[in-house]
Image: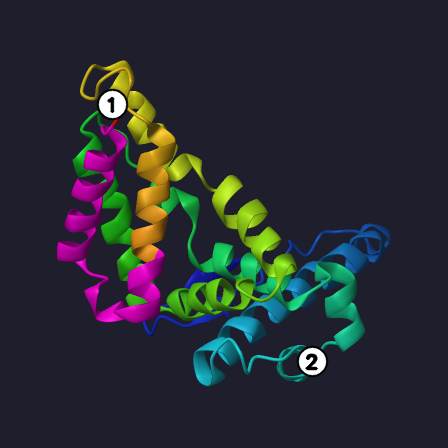
Amino acid sequence: MLVIDKTNRLVYIVSMQSTDISPQKSRRSAGPLRSTQSKTAILQAAIQVAQDDGYAAASIEKIARRAGAGKQTIYRWYGSKAALFVDAYAAIVPVEALEKSTGDAEADVTFVLTALFKIYNETAAGIILSGLVGASAEDPGTAGQIRAGLMVGRGNVLRNPLDRAIAEGNLPRDFCVETAIETVIALVWHRLLTAPNGLDAAGAGVIARRAIACGGIH
């Protein structure tokens, strides 16, 4: 699995199987195991290349060389550079690290954003996301990958605490969750592209307050 060590680099850990596995079973599992190892190596290589060279310069050729994989293998598994980096972003930013739902909408959104910004400041996640967002302006395929993999696929990180706050009466019944979520995304992406130094705990609180305010406007 992918984990972040104390130097904030992604490392790959191979869990060793017990030594009493029969040769026949080992042969059956060798293919899937090698596939998993290769995919992990590719994700790790993509993250490292983005960290070193930036998203725009992170070509599939560079990633393949660093991973020791074939370029065609990467395209076969991911289809595009954007799809690869959406997966790489998800590997660095686990949803579990961002979950918070206490019923206090502003506090929960602030928690989510503070945790997210900490990851951005310590890993290549911010570089990857800003690269994806920038590329999406000219490439509908990248925009589609962002929508499917990051907005739809991970939207409950913000939706759940807002829905809970409504259910518990801490937000009005007519509160617009979609508007609040869109406000968070717009403000985070704007800061990521124009003022990344503002991605800190104080900035998280400001964005949360503005999102809650916008969700209450009718």
Q: Quadrant of the N terminus?
A: bottom right
Q: Earlier in the sequence, mark 2 or mark 1?
A: 2
Question: Left of 181 or right of it: where is 26?
Answer: right
Closer to us: mark 2 or mark 1?
Answer: 1
Q: Position of residue 170 (x, y in %)?
A: 18, 20
The structure residue drawn at horizontal position 35% and vertical position 68%, both measured from the top left corner, is 193
Categorize mark 2 by other alpha carbons within 10 Å: few (<14), some (14-19), many (20+): few
Q: Position of residue 197 (x, y in %)?
A: 22, 70
Depth order, front residue of 124/15 = 124
Badge 2 element: loop
| Residue sitting nearer the eye, 15 or 11 | 11
**Residue 74 x/y as whole percent:** 73, 68
Magenta span main SS: helix
Does the image show residue 70? no
- Tell me: residue 112, above or below residue 102: below
Crowdedness of circle 1 by 10 Å Cα count: few (<14), some, many (20+)?
many
Q: Is residue 102 left or right of residue 180?
A: left
Under mark 1, the amino acid is Ala
Q: Amino acid at mark 2?
A: Gly
Residue shown at the point (55%, 70%) measured from the top left: 44
The percent position of residue 149, horizontal first and vertical second, equals 56, 48
Q: Is residue 212 above or below residue 35?
A: above
Q: Quadrant of residue 179?
A: top left
Q: Which residue is mark 1?
A: 165
- Residue located beneath label 2 in the image: 68
